Image: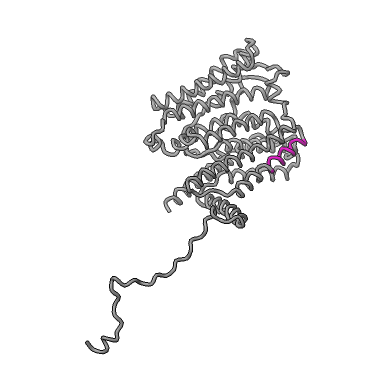
Amino acid sequence: MSKDMQGAPQPETQGTARPSTPKPAAPKPAALLDRGDVRVKHAIGIVGTVSAFVERVRSGDLGSLPVIAGLVIIWTVFTILNPVFLSANNLVNMLFDCSTVGVISLGIVCVLMVGQIDLSVGSMSGFASALVGVLWVNHGWPVLLAIVVAVVIGALVGAVYALLLNRFGMPSFVATLAGLLAILGLQLYILGATGSINLPYDSTLVNLGQLIIIPAAISYLLALAPGAVMMLLGLRTRERRRASNLSAPSVGSLLVRSLTITVLLEIVVAYLNQGRGVPLMFGVFLGLAVAMDYALKRTRWGRSMNAVGGNREAARRAGINVGAIYVSAFVLCASLAALGGVLTAARLASASTQAGTGDVNLNAIAAAVIGGTSLFGGRGSAYSAVLGIIVIQSIASGLTLLNLSSSLRFMITGAVLAIAVIVDSLARQSRVSHGRA
């Protein structure tokens, strides 16, 4: 072997260990930070919450952001044109009007979430108001019993719609359109030749629809409840996720959200109390919305509703009883339509052939869609009905104060509805493209 070969570097053999480069230490998990780093952990949690929100918006999950932005624009324009619009008493009257159609819209949210529709909610509300008037005023039944009978009949009608869909495959559009005509005929039949029944003005039901206000002290206490419940549920969810080694929001971010909601609600209640106060009927409407939101988001039934609306066949293969979910959606929708009709009779102090007709049907559906419930199924919230009906009633109230024709209300509401559907469709396409990416 030559000297050059002897001096050349020899290749490494398999048994020779290569020097390993030290790896950088893994970042310390937020859950293992020392007590001195609590502020850092909370800051990371809040920044993470904001980042997650921005990412959801970029992916097409807009939530209630469009309707809130639209509501701010509507209120700003009407306030500039007539400052009376945002007066406390005008807002109180608006909340009274929101409650009647808003309860009906809650039922629409249920059927839209499973990808169906109910076109008979207006007729069902009118029939329920007529039935209560006949049983209570003409036949002397206790008012509470008359209301229960009306709601039960509404539930039976919803069960019939679900039967036609599950057993015979009849599209809900056709079944509920037939129901609209049949129920309207029943309403005209039971009212008879008079066509209207006046409810007693001194009754509790009429006072509920026109006069009863939640006492100021109680309204302030009730305004604390949403933030407290949000904090408690958030902490419970956080503990479950940490127990499963999943990412969880920080206590600081939960506290900021709950405090923000609480402060906003207290300000609203304080402003309304400068006028007449918070209507009890609107409190009933909000109570129903809160109960439904909890059921949709935190129960197995609510998850099944979303699954069926998202993909019926996949939900069936996952073991979900699709037929039963349809029954629950239609029964809830028709029952809430009947209850909304009772509240409408209380608001107007009468039951007539005009109840449930006109724009009641369209406003209930439009409120759910404008508020953010998807027409394609699988996405919606009880609070979408609340936001949507506030938008519709804001338009109606603002145009009334300006002494403008009601024709403008229909045109503006139709434009807002079209924009809401376009935004929903674009957001849906964005979510699909983002998921593929």
Label tally: 0
Is 376 included in the stretch rendered in magenta? no
Stretch of the chain drawn in magenta: 263-274
Q: What's the residue at 65%, 36% (across, down)? A: 225
Secondary structure mostly taken by the magenta-highlighted segment of the chain: helix
Within the image, what quadrant is residue 234 found in? top right
Residue that extends furthest to the top in the rendered view of this protein: 139
In this picture, residue 304 sits left or right of residue 260: left
> Residue at position x 68%, y 40% from top?
265
Q: In which quarter of the image is the N terminus?
A: bottom left
The image shows residue 181 at horizontal and vertical percentages of 51, 22
Horizontal placement of 275 versus 113: left or right? right
**Residue 380, x across and y down, in percent:** 52, 38
In the image, residue 302 sits, relative to residue 257, either above or below, namely above
Q: Is residue 336 left or right of residue 263?
A: left
Identify the residue at image location x=47%, y=45%: 244
Instruction: Specify whether residue 267 is painted magenta.
Output: yes
Q: Which of 386 and 328 is in front in this view?
A: 328
Residue situated in front as seen by the camera: 315 or 3: 3
- Camera-side residue: 156 or 197? 156
Q: Which quadrant, please, contains the C terminus?
A: bottom left
Residue 359: image location, x then y, percent: 59, 30
Its colouring scheme is one colour
Give the vertical position of 357 relative to 22 (above or below): above
